[in-house]
Image: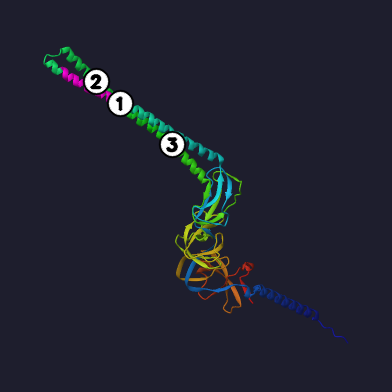
Amino acid sequence: MDIKREGVAKKKRIRMAIYLTLIAAALGLGSWRLSLLKPAAPTVERATVWIDGVKRGPMLREVRGLGALQPEDIIWIPAAFDGQVAKIVAHSGDDVKAGSVMLVLSNPDMQLAANDFEWQVKQAEATLADLKVQLLSKTFDQQSVVSSSQSDLQQAALQKEKEEQLGKMQLESELSVKLAVAKWEQSANKYKMEKQKLDIQQESVDAQLGSARVQVDKLRAAYTLKKQQVADLTIKAGINGRMQEMTLQVGQRVKPGDVLAKIAQPWKLKAELKIAETQAKDILLGQKAEIDTRNGIIPGHVSRIDASIVNGTRTVDVRLDGPLPAGAVPDLSVDGVVEIERLADVVFVGRPVFGQPNSQVSLFKLEDDGKGATRVTVKLGRSSVNTIEIVDGLKVGDQVILSDMSANDVNPRIRLN
């Protein structure tokens, strides 16, 4: 016979509710625990990153720049007159000596003008000689008149003296004495005037000859200038050097100001470095530098700092203090390093890829086990070519990754494999 069981269904429902509650609580607890877990750190190959240790000690501050060797002195030879290239003696790359002919220009009009001035000078000199003869002849004529007047005066004086003595002895009339005196006075006045005319004549001679000589000198100076201009059509080197540029052709016409040639001394070179404006602000005249020509390193010092900024860089000239290595020629590409200062005792590390002086950057610092790295904020100070000062955020002995880690900017930690 069946026995009726009461309350079984109810108990089943209660057990089911308990089970569901426990399952829900377990799921909630698991979700909460999962939410607390950090995302898995990405893995980076150790061999692909650059790791350096923080050190303490002296640090040499330097700035680096690219550039080229350039002649210290370049002589540009421009055309002074219109002309036509008649002959080319020296070409690009040829060695020239001071005074040697490089090319010859021609200008028929200038040659004709020089010849014309030459004939004008000869004509003026002949005119001067003729004038000198004429004036000398007139002077001699006047001197003759003066001499004749002087002789007449002397005779009149003797006659006057004679008449006066005879008059005293009552041997001549008073009228004869007066006539003798009048004649003497007339002769004296005439001699005086003729003497003045001779003096005036001499002054006139000097003035006319001076004017003629000025004309001769003027024409002679013009002729000398034209002759020098014709001579200047033969272009000569002013210094010993090497022809850097010669692009003219025989028959080509040139005008004043056109560059005919460029001469440099290849054994006297300097380095022109292009240095970023942010780094060039610390460069001073006289600072030591080293120039790498890929065939040797040459010591030098800063000799000029360009005041202008072009494309974010400033030009710094370095005068070379050592001998040039083989193959050092103008326009040779070089690297240069300028020594800014020597810091005696600072905390420093290798310069990160994006590390700028006096800035704050984020770097990955290696953990103690070396298997991972955590992102830290580092304050940087003064910088050099390959090193930079640590102001805050790292201590001596810390290992940091200096490579470009921008691909992991969102990750606070990485694993090293």
Q: 172 or 80: which is nearer to us?
A: 172
Range covered by the magenta-colored residues? 144-163
Q: Is there any visible trace of residue 168 in the rendered image?
A: yes
The three-letter code of the residue at mark 1 reads Ser
- Mark 2 or 1, closer to the camera: 1
Location of the C terminus (image quadrant): bottom right
Q: Nearer the viewer, mark 1 or mark 3?
A: 1
Residue nearest the observer in this picture, 402 or 97: 97
How is the rendered protein coloured? Answer: rainbow
Quarter of the image where one finds residue 157: top left
The amino acid marked with disc number 2 is Ser
In x, y percent, where is residue 311? 57, 55
Mark 1, residue position: 144
Q: Can you say which quadrant of the picture contains the N terminus?
A: bottom right
The answer to whether residue 152 is above or below residue 208 is above
Q: Count up the numbered dots.
A: 3
Distance (Cα) linking label 1 and label 3: 36 Å
Q: Going by the image, does 218 lie left or right of 363?
A: left
Which is nearer the N-term, disc 1 or disc 3? 1
Q: Main secondary structure of the magenta part?
A: helix
Q: Which residue is mark 2?
A: 187
User: Counting residues from the N terminus, which is met first, the one under dot 2 or under dot 1?
Assistant: 1
Q: Secondary structure at mark 3?
A: helix
Gap in angstroms between the C-alphas marked 2 and 1: 15 Å
Dot 2 or dot 3: first in sequence order is 2
